Image (cartoon, rainbow, N blue to C red):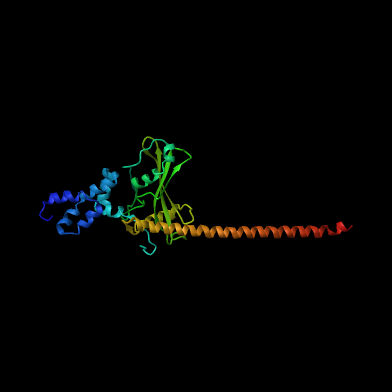
Amino acid sequence: MMSLNGDLIADLLGRVDGVTLASLGCVSSQFWSIAKEEKIWEEKCSSLWPSTQDSDVKKFISSSLGGFRNFYASCFPIIAYDESFKRHKVKKTSGDGLPKIDTIENVKKDLNFWGQMTENIRLSWIMVNKRTGQAANLSSWRPLCEQSDWASHKDCVISFGSILPAHNVLPCKSVQCILVLKCRLSDSLKITELSMRLEDTMGAWVNGRDSLLILERAVGCRRSNKQIQFFASYQKHLSERGKLKEANMKNEGCLDIICILGGIVVSASFWCLVFRESGPILEI
C-alpha cells in the first residue's frame, strides 16, 4: 500500500466508511495525512446528512464546528448515556430498501412489514450549541418502536430517540428524548410529520428552561458507535420508569383503601349520630 500513488490511496480511503477511515488514519503518517483531509470528511457527511451540502450549513460547520471531520466525530456516534459518566439542527432520513407498499390493508396483514421498516429506515436529529461549538445526534439511528396510526388508517408512526442526563435539573436521573416520525402509507413512503419531545421517568413532558438545560448538557454525554451500549441505557431507563409506575400504582391503591375506610368510618359515625338523636323520639 505504501508504494501506491497518494491520489490512489486517497481514492481508496474515500470509499470506506467514517469509522474505518478514522482507524486507517492510525496506521501510518501517510495514511494520517490523507485521512484528515476535509474534502473526504465532507463527502462522508454529505452521504449521511444531505442537508450538509447546503452552502450556509457548509460555512457554519467549517467556521463554527471545527470542520467536517469534527462534525462527523461528534454526530455519527449516538448518545450512550451512563449516569456514572457526568461531564440548529440538521435532519436526515433515508428510505433505501424500504418494503413496497400497496394498501393499508396489506400492511396490516404483512407481519414482515415492520421488521423491514426497522432494518431500512434511519433518522438523524443533530443539535448544535452555537455558543460552545458542540454538536450531538439525539437520534438512536434505528427505530425504537413502530406502529400504525389507526386513527387515520393511512399513517405509520416510528419512534427514535436517546436517553439524556437530568441530574441537578429534575428529581429523576434521566429523561427520554423521543423523536416521532409519521409517514403516509401510499404508493411510496412520504414523511408527513417529524417532532421531538422530552419525557421524564413518569412519562410527563419536560418543557421550558428545564428542557433547554437538559439539551445543553446532552452535547457533553458519552458517545458510542455500538448500538448495544445505547440499548443498555435505554432498557435501564425503561426499567426505572416501570418501577416508578408500579410504586405509584401501589401508593394509589393504598390511598384508595384509606379513602374507602375513611368513607365507611364517616358514614358509620353519621348514622350512629342520627340514631342517637332519634332514639328518644322512637321511645315516645
Question: Which residue is farthest right?
Answer: 284
On-image quarter of the N terminus? bottom left
Q: Is 15 left, or right, of 284 in this rendering?
A: left
Locate residue 43, reporting x and y percent.
Answer: 23, 47
Locate residue 265, reporting x and y percent.
Answer: 70, 60
Q: Residue at x 38, y 64 (%)?
A: 84
Depicted 255 relative to depicted 40: above or below: below
Query: Is residue 252 something that shows in the picture?
Result: yes
* Number of on-image labels: 0
Locate residue 28, reporting x and y percent.
Answer: 16, 59
On-image quarter of the C terminus? bottom right
Q: Is 137 left, or right, of 275 in this rendering?
A: left
Q: Nearer the viewer, residue 86 or 20?
A: 20
Locate residue 255, reporting x and y percent.
Answer: 61, 59
Q: Residue at x 86, y 59 (%)?
A: 280
Query: Is residue 67 something that shows in the picture?
Result: no
Depicted 184 relative to depicted 162: above or below: above
Question: Which residue is farthest bottom?
Answer: 84
